[in-house]
Image (spheres, grey):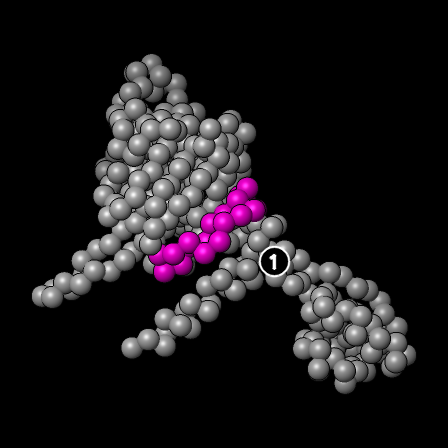
Amino acid sequence: MSAIEILGLEKTYPVGFWRKRPKRALKPLSLTIEEGEIFGFLGPNGAGKTTTLKMLMGLVFPSGGTARILGRPIGDPAMQAQIGFLPEQPYFYDHLTPRELLTYYGQLSGLTTKEAERKVPEMLDRVGLRDAANVQLRKFSKGMLQRVGIAQSILHNPKVVFLDEPMSGLDPMGRHEVRDLIEQLKHEGKTIFFSTHILSDAEALCDRVAILHLGELRKVGAVADLTSAIGGRIELVWRGATIPQAFSALGAECHATGDTVRALVPESSQEAAMEALRREGLRLISLTPLRTSLEDYFVSQVKPSEATAGGKP
C-alpha cells in the first residue's frame, strides 16, 4: 500500500493590498510515496515545498485536489495520530526544558504517564540531548532546538514522518547524526518524507526524490536514474606540460601543475581526446569517469525557468 498519495493538490493565494490578484503557490501536484521509503522533496526557497507540507498536515486548506496518507484522507484524526511533523521553523515554550516539553507533547499524542517517562529519556538520548534534558530551551542554539523538534516528531512512534528542512541550523556533526537517525527510522519500517535544499543530504539518504520549482513538479525518480540522464564527464591526467589544441574545441577544462596536466572533457568526447594525446605523443597517467551529481541535475532543471522568469517584466 502507498503511504502517501497526492492527487492534483494545488494552492492559490490572493496577494496585493487593494486589488487582490491570485498567485499560484502550487500547481496541481500528483505524487505517490511507498511505505518504508525515504522520499526527498527538493527545490529552492519559494518552490512550494512548505506549502505542500502544510496542506498535508491540514494546516492550510488546498484550493483543489486531495491527498491520502495511510489510506485515509488528510484531516482524518485517525490518520493524524499516525504521523509526525517537524515544521521548518518550530516554536517551543522557551521556559520549558526538553524533558518537560516532550512530556507535554507525549500527553498530547496519547502517551500514558508511564510511557512518557520511558520514552522521553530515550528520545533525548537519540537526538543527542541527554545531558541538556533539564536546561531551559531559551538557552538552546538553533541546532539544539532542531534536535528537540525532531524528537517530538517521532516521540509517539508514528508510521509516517514529515520533516521540513530537518538539517537547518545543524553543524556538520549534527547533520551526520540526523542522517543516521533518518536511516534508523527507515530500518524500523517508517516512511520519511522530507523537504530540503541541501542536495548532498538528499543524495546520501533518499530512495527517490522529486524536484519542485515555481510551484511545479519537474521530475521524480531515483537519484541514479535522474543523474544518468545527463551526459557525464571524464578526467584525463597525462605527463607533459603540453595541452593539445584540439582540447579547446572539445570544451575541455585543463589545469597544468608542473609537468602534469589534468583535463575534464565531456564523456562523448573521450575518443577524440585520447586520439589528440596519441598524436602529440603524450603519456596518459589515468582516465576516470566522473559521476554526475544530483546538484548538476538539479541546476539543469531549475536554471532554464529562472532565466525565463527573470526575463518577465
**Foreground residue among 16 and 255:** 16
Residue 262 in view, yes or no: yes
- Above or below — where is 127 with respect to 195? above
Label 1 crowd bin: few (<14), some (14–19), many (20+), radius 10 Å = few
Judge from the rendering whether residue 176 lies leftward or rightward of residue 115; answer left or right: right
- Say whether residue 138 is visible: no
Give the residue at x 79% y 74%.
Answer: 272
Q: Between 67 and 243, which is closer to the camera in this rendering? A: 67
Main SS of residues in magenta: strand
* Kind of residue at disc 1: Ala
Instruction: Residue 168 in the image: state x and y as whole percent.
Output: 40, 50
Assess whether residue 211 is covered by the magenta stretch: yes
Q: Is residue 263 above or below residue 61?
A: below
Q: Residue at x 31, y 40 (%)?
A: 66
Q: Position of residue 121 (x, y in %)?
A: 40, 25
Q: Residue furthest left?
A: 18
| The quadrant where residue 215 appears | bottom left
In what quadrant of the picture does the C terminus appear?
A: bottom left
Q: Nearer the viewer, residue 15 or 284?
A: 15
Q: Residue furthest bottom?
A: 245
Task: Determine if the magenta segment contains residue 201.
Answer: no
Q: Position of residue 146 (x, y in %)?
A: 37, 43
Direction from residue 173 to residue 279 in the image, left or right: right
Q: Which residues are magenta?
A: 204-222
Q: Is residue 298 above or below residue 157?
A: below
Identify the residue under disc 1. 229
Residue 6, percent across and down?
A: 37, 41
Element type at mark 1? loop
Q: Residue at x 39, y 18 (%)?
A: 118
